[in-house]
Image (spheres, rainbow, N blue to C red):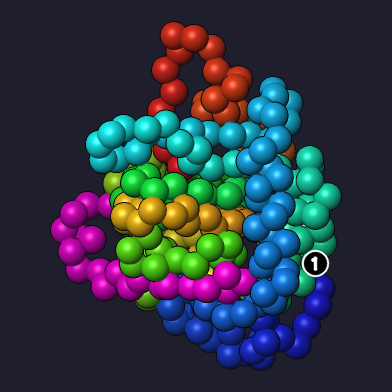
């Protein structure tokens, strides 16, 4: 496990911020050239054929008229893309998360959220409430900025300091409106190459993309090695409950949770 810095700041400082707020922002974690390469890899995945047994592609309807079917996310892509696999599992990002966890970080899930123009956002939620406790008691997610995120295109919003209050609702249920009203959700605009690390209990949300350009971000979730390699079990369970569009059976109904 690497030591010394987390995204350019000392371990102690980063851990203190993370303990206080449930998140830490790392501006410029990736250089402009590295961010451009990540954007190119994203285009490669988007252009690749959708096939059962390959990376998973999900689609959604835009929120406003005229309704359009647009790409929502791509998941489970590291086994099929050497560049992403190196970035996600074998480079300084996983080392930074390891430093934050105080243990070797193991990848739990990976996804690219596209949030195309007029695509909807996400209501307030905690990732841990999506049944994740069956795999590990705690996770850290790294949000890697591909396109600049703004209030207008639905950037990540987090409620600092609410990560240490446990689950705020039963699993699979929304956070009660009364609880959300007490939070101070803060938008976190980011530039390409910026990284935000956040706790799986940190409540967060995002709004609709009201711009004419996509808002692509990479979300990488890790657990401590002490809790085992859970990636295979998670994706097997998710495929059974919510497979990618190309693997769905006509007439079957699938409910998105997280």
Comparing 231 with 164, the one in front is 231
Q: Is 102 above or below relative to 179?
A: below
- Can the viewer see residue 15? no
Residue extent of the magenta highlight = 175-195
Residue displayed at 45% across by 36% down? 70
Whole-percent x and y of residue 38? 69, 59
Residue displayed at 53% across by 12% down? 249
- Can the viewer see residue 253? yes
Query: What kind of element bears circle 1?
Result: loop
Whole-percent x and y of residue 163? 41, 68
Q: Is 27 above or below relative to 68?
A: below
Comparing 52 with 18, the one in front is 52
Whole-percent x and y of residue 64? 26, 40
Whole-percent x and y of residue 102? 70, 74
* Residue position marked by numbered label 1 in the rendering: 91
Residue displayed at 52% across by 78% down? 25
Picture quadrant of residue 179: bottom left
Q: Is residue 127 magenta?
A: no
Badge 1 local density, few (<14 within 10 Å), some, or many (20+)?
Answer: few
Comparing 53 with 180, the one in front is 53
Q: Is residue 180 magenta?
A: yes
Q: Give left or right: position of 81 versus 119.
A: right
Comparing 14 with 38, the one in front is 38
Residue displayed at 83% across by 50% down? 82
Quadrant where the image shows the N terminus: bottom right
Q: Give left or right: position of 19 versus 203.
A: right
């Amino acid at each position: 496990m690497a030591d010394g810095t987390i995204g350019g700041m000392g371990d102690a400082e980063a851990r203190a911020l993370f303990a206080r707020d449930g998140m830490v922002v790392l501006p410029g974690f990736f250089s402009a050239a590295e961010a451009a390469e990540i954007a190119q890899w994203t285009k490669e995945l988007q252009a690749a054929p959708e096939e059962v047994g390959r990376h998973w592609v999900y689609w959604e309807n835009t929120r406003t008229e005229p309704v359009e079917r647009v790409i929502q996310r791509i998941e489970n892509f590291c086994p099929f893309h050497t560049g992403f696999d190196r970035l996600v599992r074998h480079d300084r990002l996983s080392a930074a998360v390891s430093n934050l966890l105080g243990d070797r970080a193991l990848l739990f899930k990976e996804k690219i959220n596209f949030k195309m123009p007029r695509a909807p956002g996400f209501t307030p939620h905690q990732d841990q409430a999506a049944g994740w406790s069956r795999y590990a008691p705690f996770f850290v997610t790294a949000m890697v900025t591909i396109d600049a995120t703004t209030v207008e295109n639905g950037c990540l919003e987090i409620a600092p300091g609410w990560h240490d209050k446990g689950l705020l609702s039963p699993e699979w249920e929304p956070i009660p409106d009364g609880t959300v009203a007490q939070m101070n959700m803060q938008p976190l605009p980011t530039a390409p190459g910026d990284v935000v690390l956040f706790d799986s209990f940190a409540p967060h949300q995002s709004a609709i993309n009201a711009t004419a350009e996509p808002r692509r971000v990479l979300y990488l979730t890790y657990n401590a090695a002490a809790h085992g390699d859970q990636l295979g079990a998670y994706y097997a369970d998710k495929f059974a409950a919510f497979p990618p569009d190309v693997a769905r059976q006509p007439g079957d109904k699938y409910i998105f949770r997280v």
